[in-house]
Amino acid sequence: MPLIAAVACAVTIFARHGTYAPTAHLHGPGLVLDGAGITGSPPSSIEWLHRRIIGDAKKRGGNVVVLRASYSDVYDKPFRRYGKFASVQTVLIPPCATHAEVDRVAPIVDKADAVYFAGGDQANYVAWKGTALMDAVKRVYARGGVVGGGSAGLAIQGAVVYDSVAGDHLNLETTTRDAVANPLEPQISFTTGLFAWPALAATITDTHFAVRNRFGRTVVFLARILAGDLVPGAVPFYALGVDEGSSVVVGPDGMATVLNVGVARGAYLVRAEPPARVVAGESFRYTVSVSHVARNGERFDLLHKQTPEPWYDVTVDAATTPIYSRDPYAP
């Protein structure tokens, strides 16, 4: 049962699983970037999160706060089961909550060792920009904790966020098919300055990457970011696409590890460089470079955007069928 009654627009603080215990020393900072999907977070990424906080896989400890704008505390039990955390607690902040209500959650986050943003709609999370809550999340990372999320919770971690705000307003989804056909479509909107994690500088993140064929729309996002100079001086600009059932976990030095469940395809690092033309009435065509880091346990340098895998070029061309010059998901 929630500790605060669930009423319209009220913040709901769900009952804590486990007992809160202060953590003397954190071993981060770190990031957990889950592609999500029906498999949820790979157990190995939850185990990694626990080790990054505590430094000991067998010792119970660390306190996780899950933030979400919809649904319930479905993540609490898996986090406790696989991570051996001292405590896990979900806070539900509905989209209609005021900034004052959002800021009430900041003291809870200030006691956390890790903050995980659940899936849902990233438009609800970017609405928290500039709040005391988001400042508290940044403090968790700054003192050596871990921040991350899955699906929408991953989509908000980059230097530029595809925020879904315009799409929600128009009740339209952005897919590869419509984005490549019309890269200036009104449902594409971005938020900058939400977070500034060093390993994700000059990077936009995308989720469910291969399963939902999001490569084309991500390339459109990259072209829009460069053409619009959304992050001045950030050249080249990158995208990190994480597939369903995969996770990318990032240590304090910016070194990342891919963790997979089942047939998940891992992570795709996409590099875009000028010139990037996005002109009304002009057919979209843009070439990017891709490095596919697919193997479970494979490591790469996300901070410096270097991988052990080869880079290959893919052209996205609205005037051709298929729109890809080669299969972007298979090197």
Image (cartoon, grey):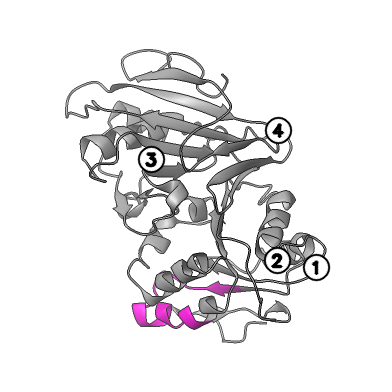
Span colored in magenta: 90-107
At horizontal 44% and vertical 83% (from top left) the residue drawn is 104
State the residue in front, 295 or 319.
295
Q: CA distance from mark 4 to mark 3?
A: 25 Å
At horizontal 29% and vertical 41% (from top left) the residue drawn is 234
* Amino acid type, callout 4: Val
The residue carrying mark 2 is 54
| Mark 1 in CB contact with mark 2 (< 8 angstroms) | yes
Sequence order check: which comes first, mark 1 or mark 2?
2
Residue 45 spot, x, y in % from top left:
68, 51
* Amino acid type, callout 3: Thr
* Amino acid type, callout 1: Lys
The residue carrying mark 3 is 174
| Mark 1 in CB contact with mark 4 (< 8 angstroms) | no
Tally of marks: 4
Q: CA distance from mark 1 to mark 2?
A: 8 Å
The residue carrying mark 4 is 263
The residue carrying mark 1 is 59
Q: CA distance from mark 2 to mark 4?
A: 30 Å
Q: Relative to residue 220, is residue 103 depicted above or below?
A: below
Q: CA distance from mark 1 to mark 4?
A: 31 Å
Residue 282 visible in the displayed image: yes
Sequence order check: which comes first, mark 2 or mark 3?
2
Asked if the magenta segment contains residue 79, the reply would be no
Residue 37 spot, x, y in % from top left:
61, 46
| Rendered image: mark on residue 85 | none
Residue 117 visible in the displayed image: no
User: Which quarter of the figure is the N terminus placed in?
Assistant: bottom right
